[in-house]
Image (tube, helix red, strand yellow):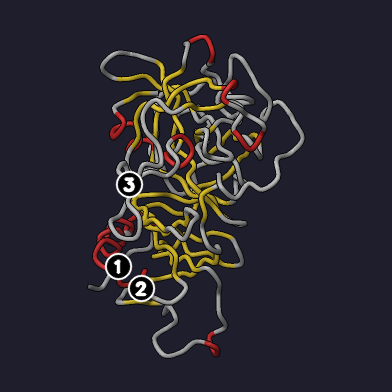
């Protein structure tokens, strides 16, 4: 399949072709050594995006060409498609790896009512972030949105790692939260698949014990309303437990990536997207918004150079909720 056609000079004209190409060959690309993900973006030169669309291969570490064995490298043109290699490291969820809790501040303290952007997690999960207040489509009931690995302890639904009704603490246990700080109970989640079948989202819901215990406006940001699809170059913002309000730019879309969930467990997530580094350990579950406060994604994991998100449209559809 030859992708780049003579006479095409504007990058966006070839992106649909690249998307079809990626769907056909993503498994082959992910099988290359040190490859952790593959998506669509613009080729970069000295860290700056060009106007050339490309298949972007994310690797844990770049290796000099002379040190690569036969078939281990990513050709600049692969099966007719332009490629680029992006070193991002190994991707991890940003809850279990938070390490020592920081000094108590407005994001790690006990807050009532609690706003999105502060410390919150399942009683067995060290750290996490209260992502957003959403509403059930059927009843209009207000719910807390965050990740499965924050609210449901990374469950596949059959492993006994959590169950509906489990206490959700604010602040999270790693920030000193105890059962006396329960603010909600686990209500629903999208089960996670590990080691094989791909996941669309890492997301879950908690029901506040009382509605007045939570408020809708994220700490440091305006109240979100509506949704937007991720697109390359979009300026985005998030409010998280660890790094507060961060600004970034979407660098990759249609991303298929492996994420480490701790305890030797890996999950494959698809239809994700990537920004520059916007989060740190403890920011899992943060809601990503654009300049118009439209929800774009839900923070899942990251590295020292990049942050990964599930598309908010998939999150809301699978959980049957609205912003």
Q: Secondary structure at mark 3?
A: loop
**Which secondary structure, mark 2?**
loop
**Where's residue 9, x and y in %?**
38, 63
Cα–Cα span, label 2 and label 1: 6 Å
Q: Give the CA separation, mark 2 to mark 3.
A: 20 Å
Indicate the position of residue 104 as horizontal and vertical percent values: 74, 30
Do labels 2 and 3 touch, CB within 8 Å? no
Which of these two is toward me, 190 or 246? 190
- Secondary element at tag 1: helix
Residue that numbered label 2 is attached to: 31
Disc 2 + disc 1, Cβ < 8 Å: yes
Q: Is residue 85 above or below residue 251?
A: below
* 146 horizontally vs 169: left or right: left
Give the answer, above or below, for where 5 lies relative to 113.
below
Residue that badge 1 annotates:
27
Q: Is residue 290 visible?
A: no
Nearer-N-terminus badge (1/3):
1
- Residue under the image location 41 percent in, 22 percent down: 134
At a point 30% along the width and 58% down the height, the residue shown is 19
Compared with 211, 8 (above or below) is below
Residue 25, by quadrant, is bottom left
Q: Would you call the spot at circle 3 few (<14 residues within 10 Å), some (14-19), or many (20 or more)?
A: many
**Lateral position of residue 70 relative to residue 177, left or right:** left
C-alpha separation, residue under disc 1 versus residue under disc 3: 16 Å
Mark earlier in primary sequence (2, 3): 2
Identify the residue at horizontal 50%, vertical 33% (top origin): 122
- Quadrant of image for the C terminus: top left
Depth check, front residue: 183 or 252:
183
Residue reaching furthest to the right: 103
The residue beneath circle 3 is 200
Residue at the image position 62 percent from the left and 29 percent from the top: 177
- Image quadrant holding the N terminus, namely bottom left
């Amino acid at each position: 399949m030859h992708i780049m056609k003579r006479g095409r000079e504007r990058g966006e004209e070839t992106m649909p072709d690249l998307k079809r190409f990626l769907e056909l060959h993503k498994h082959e690309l992910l099988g290359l050594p040190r490859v952790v993900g593959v998506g669509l973006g613009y080729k970069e030169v000295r860290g700056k995006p060009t106007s050339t669309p490309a298949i972007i291969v994310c690797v844990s570490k770049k290796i000099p060409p002379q040190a690569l064995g036969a078939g281990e490298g990513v050709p600049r043109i692969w099966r007719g498609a332009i490629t680029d290699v992006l070193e991002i490291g190994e991707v991890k969820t940003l809850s279990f790896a938070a390490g020592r809790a920081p000094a108590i501040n407005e994001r790690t303290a006990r807050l009532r009512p609690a706003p999105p952007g502060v410390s919150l997690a399942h009683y067995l999960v060290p750290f996490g972030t209260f992502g957003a207040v959403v509403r059930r489509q059927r009843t209009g009931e207000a719910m807390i949105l965050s990740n499965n690995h924050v609210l449901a302890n990374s469950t596949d639904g059959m492993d006994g790692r959590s169950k509906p009704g489990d206490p959700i603490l604010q602040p999270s246990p790693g920030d000193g939260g105890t059962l006396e700080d329960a603010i909600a109970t686990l209500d629903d989640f999208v089960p996670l698949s590990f080691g094989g079948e791909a996941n669309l989202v890492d997301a879950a819901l908690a029901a506040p014990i009382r509605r007045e215990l939570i408020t809708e406006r994220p700490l440091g940001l305006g109240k979100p309303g509506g949704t937007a699809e991720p697109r390359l170059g979009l300026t985005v913002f998030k409010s998280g437990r660890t790094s507060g309000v961060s600004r970034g730019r979407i660098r990759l879309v249609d991303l298929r990536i492996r994420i480490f969930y701790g305890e030797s467990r890996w999950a494959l997530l698809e239809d994700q997207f990537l920004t520059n580094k916007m989060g740190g350990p403890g920011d899992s579950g943060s809601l990503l918004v654009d300049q118009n406060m439209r929800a774009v994604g839900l923070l899942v994991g990251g590295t020292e150079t990049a942050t990964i998100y599930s598309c908010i449209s998939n999150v809301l559809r699978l959980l049957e909720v609205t912003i």
